[in-house]
């Protein structure tokens, strides 16, 4: 895994790579928010959502899913759920504070 | 008087029976019927479930329902008890039985919508509590919980306060009557970090990490612990054994690199 400060694209990744990268970027986002670099933190979150989108578009090409006998529909639900949670965080952090 | 199902194991302590159950499940005690043994452990400790359920009758729930919930806690205790720790089984089981019954009561009476991330954090607290309890034989200190959950003590305090308010409101009928719409432990009631990074946003990201980690665990389990040969897997997937082998090797290599930070 490269420098997670610079986002990697998720073209033709497998599920484990997607998850490994996503976890690293989410952890990095927390560090950035703690360092009051909100824009960069939001960039990490947005990137994870985009990566999941790209992965879901090529899900049926990932041999890992078949090999590990993961239920595709459950996997899609789980990843959508993560996307929804992150979207809520982004919305919350972008909205002006009262 | 020992019940029939208990008879073959009457001379054994709880801990010895669980040890035997573990060995039986691992295939090291072929003469033992693990189903019968598990039933014997449950039969021996069902009185413990009843005694704890009776203490929580003030919740207004039927005793049978409380016992049923406690029974789940007992089964969890049989499954998760760590023999290597210096804790008595009944101590550990009591802790889980009580937790499961309280959880049941809380769910039953909950008229408030608890945010999903709060539920997830409650699960994390519960896991951390059980882990410390297993290790030490006593409830965790605030510092121990904070360390396990990778939060500050102040943040854990806020979460515990939120959870406590839900539990208290749910199991105390009198208070429920006077305060029927208690405020859930929303983010506002917790705290914001000084740099403007809201606490609930941090928790939601941590929950997302947990969820991804759970998928990762399922993938790895599916890949390496399904007890099938590479040929069998390849046959099912329509690829060669060699391709299966290469794929697994690459995954292991990636995991190794990731763990070593390469």
Image: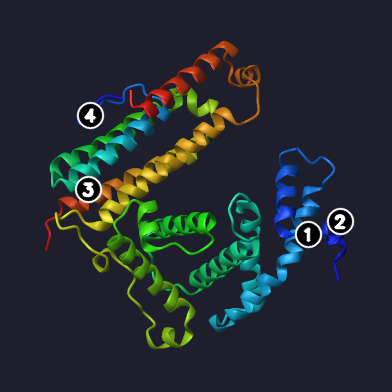
| CA distance for labels 2 and 3 | 60 Å
Label 1 marks a residue whose chain is B
- The crowding category of the residue bearing disc 2, from other C-alpha atoms within 10 Å (few below 14, some 14 to 19, many at least 20), is some
| CA distance for labels 3 and 4 | 17 Å
Task: Report helix, strand or loop for mark 2.
Answer: helix
| CA distance for labels 4 and 2 | 62 Å
| CA distance for labels 1 and 2 | 9 Å
| CA distance for labels 1 and 4 | 56 Å
Mark 2 touches mark 3? (CB < 8 Å): no
Task: Report helix, strand or loop for mark 1.
Answer: helix
- The crowding category of the residue bearing disc 3, from other C-alpha atoms within 10 Å (few below 14, some 14 to 19, many at least 20), is some
Identify the colour scheme used.
rainbow
Label 4 marks a residue whose chain is A
Q: Nearer the viewer, residue B157 or A57?
A: B157
**Can you identify the residue that label 2 sits on?**
B8
- Do the residues indicated by labels 1 and 4 lie within the same chain of the protein? no
Which label is found at residue A90?
3
Location of residue A92 by image quarter:
bottom left
> Quarter holding the N terminus of chain B?
bottom right
- Do the residues indicated by labels 4 and 2 lie within the same chain of the protein? no
- Do the residues indicated by labels 2 and 3 lie within the same chain of the protein? no
Location of residue B78 by image quarter:
bottom right
**Can you identify the residue that label 1 sits on?**
B40
């Amino acid at each position: 895994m490269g420098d997670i400060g610079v986002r990697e694209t998720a073209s033709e990744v497998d599920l484990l790579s997607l998850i490994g990268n996503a976890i690293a970027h989410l952890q990095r986002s927390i560090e950035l928010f703690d360092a009051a670099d909100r824009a960069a933190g939001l960039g990490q979150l947005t990137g994870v959502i985009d990566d999941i989108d790209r992965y879901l578009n090529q899900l049926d090409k990932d041999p890992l899913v078949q090999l590990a006998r993961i239920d595709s529909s459950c996997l899609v639900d789980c990843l959508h759920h993560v996307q929804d949670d992150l979207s809520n965080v982004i919305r919350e952090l972008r909205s002006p504070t009262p | 008087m020992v019940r029939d199902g208990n008879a073959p194991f009457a001379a054994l302590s709880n801990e010895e029976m669980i040890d035997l159950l573990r060995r039986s499940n691992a295939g090291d005690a072929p003469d033992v019927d693990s189903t019968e043994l598990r039933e014997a452990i449950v039969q021996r400790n069902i009185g413990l479930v009843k005694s704890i359920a009776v203490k929580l009758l003030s919740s207004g729930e039927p005793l049978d329902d409380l016992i049923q919930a406690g029974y789940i806690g007992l089964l969890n205790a049989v499954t998760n008890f760590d023999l290597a720790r210096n804790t008595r089984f009944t101590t550990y089981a009591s802790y889980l039985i009580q937790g499961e019954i309280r959880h049941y009561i809380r769910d039953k009476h909950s008229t408030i919508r608890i945010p999903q991330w709060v539920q997830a954090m409650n699960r994390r607290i519960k896991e951390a509590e059980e882990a410390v309890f297993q290790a030490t034989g006593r409830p965790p200190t605030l510092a121990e919980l904070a360390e396990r959950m990778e939060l500050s003590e102040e943040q854990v305090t806020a979460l515990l306060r939120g959870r406590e308010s839900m539990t208290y409101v749910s199991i105390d009928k009198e208070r429920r009557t006077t305060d029927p719409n208690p405020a859930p432990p929303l983010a506002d009631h917790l705290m914001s970090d000084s740099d403007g990074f809201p606490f609930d946003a941090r928790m939601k990201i941590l929950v997302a990490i947990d969820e991804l980690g759970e998928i990762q665990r399922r993938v790895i389990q599916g890949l390496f612990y399904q007890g099938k040969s590479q040929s069998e897997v390849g046959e099912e997937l329509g690829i060669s054994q060699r391709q299966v082998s290469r794929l697994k090797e690459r995954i292991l290599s990636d995991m190794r690199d990731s763990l070593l930070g390469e």
